Amino acid sequence: MTNQNSPHTVLRARESEVVIGPDQPFVMIGERINPTNRAKLSETMEAHDMSVVQRDAETQVTAGAQVLDINVGTAFGEESEIMPLAVKAVLEVVDVPLSIDSPDPTAIGAGLQAYREVCGSAGKPLINSTTAEAERLDEIIPLAVEYGAAVIGLTNDEEGIPETQERRFELAVEILEKAEGAGVPREDLLIDGLTLTVGADHHAALCTLTVTERVTKELALNTTSGASNVSFGLPGRRELNTTFLTMMISRGLTSAITNPLRPEIIKTVQASDLFLGLDPHALRWIQSHRE
Amino acid sequence: MTNQNSPHTVLRARESEVVIGPDQPFVMIGERINPTNRAKLSETMEAHDMSVVQRDAETQVTAGAQVLDINVGTAFGEESEIMPLAVKAVLEVVDVPLSIDSPDPTAIGAGLQAYREVCGSAGKPLINSTTAEAERLDEIIPLAVEYGAAVIGLTNDEEGIPETQERRFELAVEILEKAEGAGVPREDLLIDGLTLTVGADHHAALCTLTVTERVTKELALNTTSGASNVSFGLPGRRELNTTFLTMMISRGLTSAITNPLRPEIIKTVQASDLFLGLDPHALRWIQSHRE
């Protein structure tokens, strides 16, 4: 059980393909299409106006996001109507794989259906996400199978987020077994070790780092993270977030749901790729300093 | 052969003690007392005027260096006279352990003798450094035994710096066997996996990261690094150096020879300590943002 076989999660849009894997440049999943704390995006989405969504899609891809997360929020009570509108609107302006992000399985299903209508049956999006909760797994895994989608597995269950890395790792194994048993190829599962703030528990970051490393090495799965929670409530969040992202990548993290409009995130990802031998002749690093 | 026993390299000055180890805050060895590219320091040293040396010592300790490297250069042909002057001058103004740094074993011996005269026989400095070269080992290891000093072992030999992590690891083992055989306790050996620029070889950083991780996990030794070479000849050196230092710490690095006057280095070290669970309640991080 080592990562010598280097798992490849292949996502596909209409023409483009993104490969997530330890021997590939790090993959940034743009997090900006999410109405939380974004009044204008929220208002326009609610009015079924996708112009801000489309602008957010373009700016994130230009900045370097290889995949875009689509979250239409839960405030309007009509996620299942808005999700397909957002998916189609984004795919009109950019050809990158999407991560369909909702707590509501019906909205996820509607997003996957819209994605298939645009990209065809060869299209392969990402589902964000299942947990190890039995009910959630029973809803989400069949959608992954039906639409041939990859899926993010969060390491929490009915009892919440475990405090120990050992228990989170067990939940990753449970999700893997359930997904594989249902016919999801193991390379299509991305594990998120979950990140809580070190402001509340100074072992929180080490727990996530250890889960991420173990999932990488012992299960040979790809991983993802919304790593910025780690600094919640603390000063100096920018330095904390880039340092933690670097540590996560050093331990094996292969993708993150993050904000590509932050230059320090781009620099961190590019430097990490360089040090892990994924930027031959430092061409990408040097090029990015010429712009 | 795991690091569960958490090696402690204990360095001692007159009254103060510094412990290097994976369960300890990261140790910065201040690199500024080195005449390379520092005209004024060089000129004053040559004139046996230690005022600039003393100022450099104080500013580095104030900035957060726990140990100071003392390198008097090789240009004057009288290292063995100047080294003890520098050692005594520094210990007049700060009480921190010193790293006695010279290519000349006689100068190292003179520095160790001066250190003992000031700190007594309980004083415990660091020698920078031996390599795996037979001649160098034969000169340096007896000095470590005679003065009870800890010693840095560089993973190169008569044939230069190996390209592969496997060979560098073998050299670390050779240094360890030679040192232990001569009576140096294994916890008093710090291995430097050596860092070449990724501008010349894009596998260079990964090689050093892997050596550092293996020495930490398989030999349970402490490690050190002059990590800034990694970015030589490339743009964006500041981001490269902080990202690489973070990756090294994430892989197990427990000390570095570095410039504590660079705020981004201090932030990187403090954030790394926080994420590895070595800053309980984030007190040090929060405090450093109040100043």
Image (tube, coloured by chain):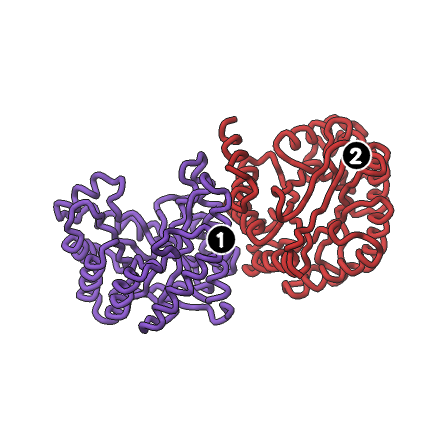
Chain colours: A red, B purple
**Circle 2 residues within 10 Å: few <14, some 14–19, many ≥20:** many
- The residue that mark 2 highlights is A87
Residue B246 visible in image: yes
Question: In front here: A260 or A3?
Answer: A3
Q: Residue at x 15, y 48 (%)?
A: B77
Position of residue A251 relative to residue A20, above or below, is below
Q: Position of residue A4 (x, y in %)?
A: 64, 55
Q: Residue at x 67, y 56 (%)?
A: A220
* Callout count: 2
Q: Nearer the viewer, mark 2 or mark 1?
A: 1
Image check: A226 left or right of B194?
A: right
Q: CA–CA distance between discs 2 and 1?
A: 41 Å
Q: Amino acid at mark 2?
A: Val
The chain ID associated with circle 1 is: B
| Disc number placed over residue B209 in the picture, else none | 1
Q: Position of residue A152 (x, y in %)?
A: 73, 50
Provide the secondary structure element on which disc 1 rests: helix
Q: Quadrant of residue A154?
A: bottom right
| Disc number placed over residue A218 in the picture, else none | none
Image check: A233 left or right of A94?
A: left
Provide the secondary structure element on which disc 2 rests: helix
Position of residue B284 relative to residue B44, above or below, is below
Q: Position of residue B178 (x, y in %)?
A: 35, 68
Image check: B163 left or right of A82?
A: left
The verdict on a common chain for dots 2 and 1 is no
**Circle 1 residues within 10 Å: few <14, some 14–19, many ≥20:** many
Question: In front here: B186 or A94?
Answer: B186
The chain ID associated with circle 2 is: A
Residue A35 visible in image: no
Q: Amino acid at mark 1?
A: Leu
Query: Which residue is outermost to the front?
Result: B159
